[in-house]
Amino acid sequence: MAPTHTSERLANNEKLESIDCPTCERDDSELLFRKDSLSIVACKGCGLRYVNPRVRSQTLEENYVEAYYPPEKINRIQTDTMEWLQMAERLEELEKHLPTQGRLLDVGCGIGTFLHLADERGWQPHGIEPSKSGAACAKETYQLDVQRGELFDANFPTAHFDAITAYHVLEHISELNPFLGELRRVLKPQTGKLVIEVPNGGSLQSRLQNADWPYVHPRDHLYYFSARTLPKLLRKHGFRDITLGRPKRVSPKEGARFALRGATTAVLVRLHLGTVIRVYAN
Ligand SMILES: [Zn+2]
């Protein structure tokens, strides 16, 4: 499962590494387009789009750990009604798929807004967040059980969680197969629910815009999943009953007219027009 490492160097001395398609575990791909001196390719076997070669992960992780949530960004998120409505929308849909509030793990929980709402709804919230300032905010502001670090650092017991959520995380993970294997291990078999949301690399907009699609950041968005390639990777790790959610984006105009809490989010949201894919799996 380890990627093959053939190193090159970018102009600014960053090391590159070549990888196999994480799903097929071989490198048989065609070039789609280039951006920021990096190539986005499509696997000929399964169609997955990914960056290859890519910037080696150490460089990126250091950056993320130190600088992802500066104080002004935290303040902006906490006071943004749209943020809270979006988190409420995620929770509302999760509860349609899993009506009983059990033990919930949010991977890449940021400053803890989603987990805070889940806590208030009766879930037992736990979080993992690589950014120091993000994890500190989640712990101090919302008194959440959040660990600073990577998923593997937590060493959770097997079959521990009723739900695991990872919103806009998977496209950043350098070693996808060990990561998904670990999610499978700590999620309760059969009854546990996994929720993955990623930018929709198979959307019409993405295919028309290629390198100009706003989600194309090849330094840290390493994969561009579609509604076909993401389930295929999940099935490889034993996830079953894979269904697509119906993620909705909160409309700024409507959102502004409503108070933060107690609002019925269903009337505040509109279709996301396929910008993101949200997948539920057992
Ligand atoms: Zn493949």
Image (tube, rainbow, N blue to C red):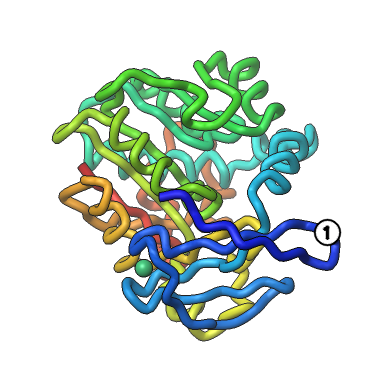
Foreground of the two, 215 or 220: 220
Foreground of the two, 150 or 16: 16
- What's the residue type where badge 1 is placed? Asn
Residue appearing at x 76%, y 35% in the figure:
66
Foreground of the two, 16 or 79: 16
Residue appearing at x 31%, y 44% in the figure:
93
Q: In this picture, is 189 found above or below 50?
A: above
Q: Position of residue 182 (x, y in %)?
A: 36, 35
Q: Label 1: few (<14), some or many (≥20) within 10 Å?
A: few
Q: Is residue 253 visible?
A: no
Name the quarter where the C terminus is drawn: top left
Q: In this picture, is 270 found above or below 56?
A: below
Q: Secondary structure at mark 1?
A: loop
Q: In this picture, is 54 found above or below 135?
A: below
Question: Disc 1 designates what residue?
Answer: 13
Residue appearing at x 49%, y 54% in the figure:
3
Q: Viewed as shown, does residue 170 lie left or right of 96? A: right
